[in-house]
Image (spheres, rainbow, N blue to C red):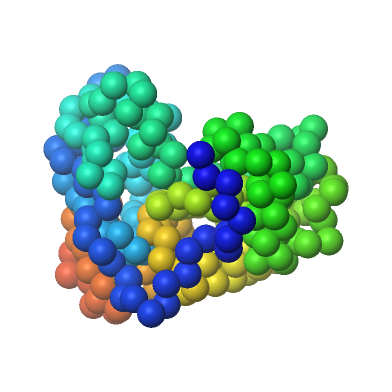
């Protein structure tokens, strides 16, 4: 098991982003009772790309992230990550594939009884089998990256919401995931704290090759970091394209209607 103490994530500025398909959903359907949230959805994300999902609440965006995190199971279809099936698959395979995926939630979900440092090191030690020293070194590097080196021994209750969310970002990156899922990560923050968290995510997007799948209503952030934007409505992708195209020249009436309401 890995016990390396290199940088907290891999930087590969010399190589272009994108090394083939990393995530694929094929004919994925998810229902809650009689309500179909995802309707035979097909889409893929290439390695190293940053894809943002936009659309009205209830259109299925967060459901996709929860399926990838194995918090939900699809009713139909297949999900593949890095060439390995996530659904349907044996439980052992699901656990292994799941290690390649990290997620930052709307709520910070930090362990209140643990220090900032231990919140970040707990999973690498218990799940990846890293040594405590290696995990702590990586955690300190990540805390420096998110601007929290002075808070290593504090508990979550001693931090602001923005600081807690930055710890949650560091915690997700500590597992060295190939994919980082971001689910409305600023929606629970006071407005004055939003910019700091988004700046951290912009730095990650610009300085690393990590694949990012983001659900957000922060349209300027989506424009800044995205390689592709997908517009969702009623469980389907109704428009997809580069951010300049989607935000400046949307083709679908529903996209124009949505953006006029949020921009």
Residue 74 visible at all: no
Q: In this view, does 4 lie above or below 80?
A: below
Residue 212 visible at all: yes
Question: Which quadrant of the structure image shows residue 53?
Answer: bottom left
Q: Where is residue 111 in the image (x, y as percent from the top left)?
A: 71, 35
Q: Decide if residue 98 is on the left or right side of residue 194.
A: left
Of residues 91 and 76, which is closer to you in this image? Answer: 91
Q: In this view, does 244 lie above or below 49?
A: below
Q: Where is residue 238 in the image (x, y as percent from the top left)?
A: 19, 55
* Residue drawn at point x = 78 percent, y = 36 percent: 114
* Residue drawn at point x = 71 percent, y = 65 percent: 144
* Residue drawn at point x = 42 percent, y = 44 percent: 101
* Residue drawn at point x = 25 percent, y = 76 percent: 245
Q: Decide if residue 243 is on the left or right side of residue 110.
A: left
Q: Position of residue 107 (x, y in %)?
A: 61, 42
Of residues 217 and 258, which is closer to you in this image? Answer: 217
Of residues 211 and 253, which is closer to you in this image? Answer: 211
Q: Is residue 187 above or below residue 260?
A: above
């Amino acid at each position: 098991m890995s016990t390396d103490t290199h940088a907290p994530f891999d930087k590969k500025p010399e190589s272009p982003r994108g090394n083939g398909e990393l995530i694929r959903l094929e004919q994925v359907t998810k229902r809650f009772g009689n309500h179909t949230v995802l309707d035979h959805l097909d889409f893929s994300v290439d390695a190293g790309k940053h894809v943002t999902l936009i659309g009205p609440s209830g259109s299925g965006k967060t459901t996709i992230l929860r399926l990838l995190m194995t918090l939900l199971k699809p009713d139909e279809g297949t999900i593949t990550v890095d060439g390995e099936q996530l659904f349907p698959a044996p439980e052992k395979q699901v656990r292994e594939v799941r290690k390649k995926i990290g997620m930052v939630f709307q709520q910070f979900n930090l362990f209140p009884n643990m220090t900032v440092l231990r919140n970040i090191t707990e999973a690498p030690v218990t799940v990846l089998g890293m040594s405590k020293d290696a995990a702590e070194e990586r955690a300190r590097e990540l805390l420096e990256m998110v601007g929290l080196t002075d808070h290593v021994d504090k508990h979550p209750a001693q931090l602001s919401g923005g600081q807690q969310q930055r710890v949650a970002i560091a915690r997700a990156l500590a597992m060295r995931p190939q994919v980082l899922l971001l689910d409305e990560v600023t929606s629970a923050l006071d407005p004055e704290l939003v910019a700091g968290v988004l700046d951290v995510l912009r730095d990650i997007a610009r300085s690393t090759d990590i694949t990012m799948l983001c659900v957000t209503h922060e349209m300027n952030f989506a424009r800044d970091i995205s390689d592709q934007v997908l517009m969702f409505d009623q469980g389907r992708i109704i428009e997809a394209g580069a951010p300049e195209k989607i935000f400046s020249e949307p083709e679908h009436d529903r996209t124009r209607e949505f953006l006029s309401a949020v921009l």
